[in-house]
Image (cartoon, rainbow, N blue to C red):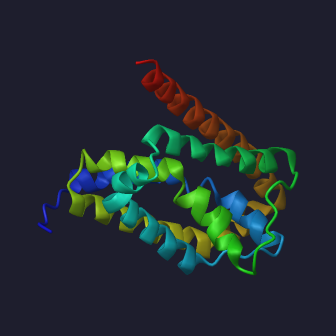
Amino acid sequence: MDLHLSIKEIFTAFMVLFAVIDITGSTPIIINLNATGKQAQAGKAALISYAVMITFLFAGDALLQLFNVDISSFAIAGALLLVLAVEMIFSVEIFRNDGPAGSVTIVPVVFPLIAGAGTLTTTLSLRAECHLSNLILAISLNMLLVYLVLRNAYLVERILGKSGVYVLRKFFGIILLAMSVRLFISNLSMLLNSFSR
């Protein structure tokens, strides 16, 4: 793989992925999972997310075609964030962790929070705009940030206090709700347009 390093491309890809992953906005969810005894393993979550994103970067198009799924249909799956948003806003438990211990690291931390449908579709979109080496570096930097935030989520709770975390949780619940609705509507309209042709 030829290296065509560009600070501009790395920064652009990093900022776009950072906005989509929104790990800082997910901090209240992580704190809530930790408070209920569902510990998310920072290193494992970052490594699995990295592996998923890199794999999807190289094989995403072929994988979706194999299952006869277009990118818009896949992106609609990002509406799973709606469930987490409802949990955050109304303080009700919808996601039940009935898997083996530690499975919370995979669901909901890796998917849909970090390497969800929105992140994966964005990764594919960025491949058309950025050189592969720059995009891989941007993903790597984002996963390093993800690790640091997951590892130190308790510091946010210590700084903000319980009431601050509560307010932050409600606020980001609304943001998450808006993101999931936008992701669903924009991709649903694209899907309907493709059927009408």
Please determine whether, in this image, residue 83 is positioned above or below residue 36.
above
- Position of residue 61 measured from the top left corner of the image (x, y, whole percent): 35, 51
Whether residue 167 can be seen here: no
Quadrant for the N terminus in the image: bottom left
- Position of residue 100 measured from the top left corner of the image (x, y, whole percent): 75, 79
Q: In front: 156, or 94?
A: 94
At 54% from the left and 54% from the top, the residue drawn is 116
Residue lying at the far top in this picture: please name it: 196
At 46% from the left and 27% from the top, the residue drawn is 190
Whether residue 183 can be seen here: yes
For residue 120, side relative to residue 13 (left or right): right
At 51% from the left and 40% from the top, the residue drawn is 73
- Position of residue 68 measured from the top left corner of the image (x, y, whole percent): 44, 46
Q: In front: 10, or 106?
A: 106
Q: In front: 150, or 190?
A: 190
Please determine whether, in this image, residue 197 is positioned above or below residue 51.
above
Q: How many marks on residues?
A: 0
- Toward which corner of the image does residue 104 lie, by quadrant? bottom right
For residue 74, side relative to residue 105 (left or right): left
- Position of residue 72 measured from the top left corner of the image (x, y, whole percent): 47, 38
Please determine whether, in this image, residue 120 is positioned above or below residue 55.
above
At 43% from the left and 25% from the top, the residue drawn is 194
For residue 50, side relative to residue 80 (left or right): left
- Toward which corner of the image does residue 173 lie, by quadrant? top right
Quadrant for the C terminus in the image: top left
